[in-house]
């Protein structure tokens, strides 16, 4: 995927994850964004070669929750 398409995907996907954090964890969107941007899930999502951008916002949110809960990231198995 070229860089512009990858950036476009992130521009659409990241706000959805932040919204889920904000709604479910009861943070305002600024706090939710700061928490997500500091996560390892986001660091991996930024790297196109990890292919995390293939996952839905909900899946990424669950990965984020797992990271916060356990300190580890579990990659879902693709079906």
Image (cartoon, helix red, strand yellow):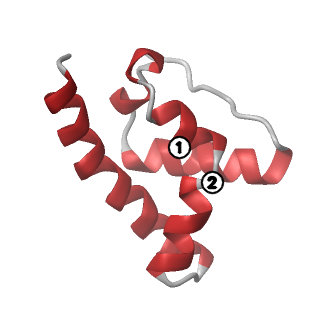
Q: Please tell me the numbered disc located at residue 62.
A: none
Quarter of the picture containing the N terminus is top left
Q: In the picture shown, does residue 61 fall above or below 56?
A: below
Asked if residue 49 is positioned above or below residue 76 in the image, the reply reads: above
Please rate how many residues cluster around mark 2, counting C-alpha atoms within 10 Å: few if below 14, some from 14 to 19, many from 20. few
Q: Position of residue 68 (x, y in %)?
A: 75, 53
Q: Quadrant of residue 49?
A: top left
| Pointers 1 and 2 in contact (C-beta within 8 Å) | yes
Q: Quadrant of residue 34?
A: bottom right
- Report whether 70 appears left or right of 64: right
Q: Is residue 65 above or below residue 79?
A: below
Q: Secondary structure at mark 2?
A: loop
Q: Secondary structure at mark 1?
A: helix
Residue farthest right in this picture: 70
Instruction: Identify the residue position indicated by label 1 in the image.
Output: 42
Question: Of residues 63 and 79, which is closer to you in this image?
Answer: 63
Residue 18 % position (x, y): 44, 64
Identified at 84% across, 45% down, the residue is: 70
User: x, y (%) of residue 40?
Assistant: 65, 40
Q: CA distance from mark 1 to mark 2?
A: 7 Å
Q: Residues within 10 Å of mark 1 (few under 14, many from 20)?
A: some
Of 38 and 70, nearer the camera is: 38
Judged left or right of residue 74, residue 51 is: left
| Mark 2, residue position | 38
In terms of image quadrants, where is residue 41?
top right
State the quadrant of the C terminus: top left
Residue at 70%, 34% in the rendered image: 73
Say whether residue 71 is left or right of residue 44.
right
Q: Residue at x 50, y 84 (%)?
A: 28
Residue 78 or 26: which is nearer the viewer?
26
């Amino acid at each position: 995927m070229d860089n512009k398409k990858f950036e476009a995907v992130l521009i659409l996907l990241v706000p959805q994850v932040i919204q889920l954090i904000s709604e479910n964890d009861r943070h305002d969107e600024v706090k939710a964004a700061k928490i997500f941007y500091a996560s390892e899930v986001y660091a991996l999502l930024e790297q196109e070669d990890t292919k995390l951008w293939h996952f839905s916002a909900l899946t990424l949110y669950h990965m984020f929750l797992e990271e916060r809960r356990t300190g580890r990231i579990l990659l879902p198995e693709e079906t």
